[in-house]
Image (spheres, grey):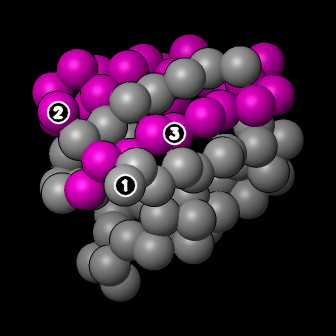
Amino acid sequence: MTKVIILDGKLIKKRSHDYLSEVFDFPSYYGRNLDALYDCLTDIGTQTEIHLINSRYVSLDLIDTFIDASCSSSFITFIEE
């Protein structure tokens, strides 16, 4: 069964890595930067579909991080809405 995570770009802009850490339930050692985000995303071991809504509020670097992680992991599907 695929886990579906809906991320809101408005909340990412407002709360940044705190929001991402909560939504993904990242470990306490999560480094709160794009490299750490990539590492934690590629550690996901279950089928996960990530939907990003309101993507115009986030940086292209963040979107690229999600795309790169989805290309590197067979468990992650990233959809920008």
Tag 1: residue type?
A: Met
Q: Earlier in the sequence, mark 3 or mark 1?
A: 1
Q: Which residue is mark 2?
A: 74
Tag 2: residue type?
A: Ser
Query: Can you say whether 7 is above or below 43 in the image?
Result: above
Residues at discs 2 and 1 in contact (Cβ within 8 Å)? no
Count neighbours of disc 2 (C-alpha within 10 A) and say few if under 14, some if 14 to 19, many if 20 or more: some
Provide residue 44's location: percent of width, then percent of height. Answer: 24, 56
Which region is colored magenta?
46-74
Residue in view at x 47 percent, y 64 percent: 24
Residue sitting at the far bottom = 28
Q: Which residue is mark 1?
A: 1
Residue in view at x 45 percent, y 74 percent: 25
Please check the rendered image and state whether residue 64 is part of the magenta-colored stretch, yes or no: yes
Q: CA distance from mark 2 to mark 1?
A: 14 Å
Give the number of the disc on residue 50.
Answer: 3
Tag 3: residue type?
A: Ile
Helix, strand or loop status at disc 1: loop
Helix, strand or loop status at disc 3: strand
Which numbered disc, 3 or 1, marks the residue closer to the eye?
1
Provide residue 36's location: percent of width, then percent of height. Answer: 29, 52
Provide residue 52's location: percent of width, then percent of height. Answer: 65, 32
Residue in view at x 46 percent, y 40 percent: 49
Residue sitting at the far front = 1
Q: CA distance from mark 3 to mark 1?
A: 14 Å
User: In the rendered image, which quarter is residue 80 located in?
Assistant: top right
Give the number of the disc on residue 37.
Answer: none
Q: CA distance from mark 2 to mark 3?
A: 13 Å
Q: Earlier in the sequence, mark 2 or mark 1?
A: 1
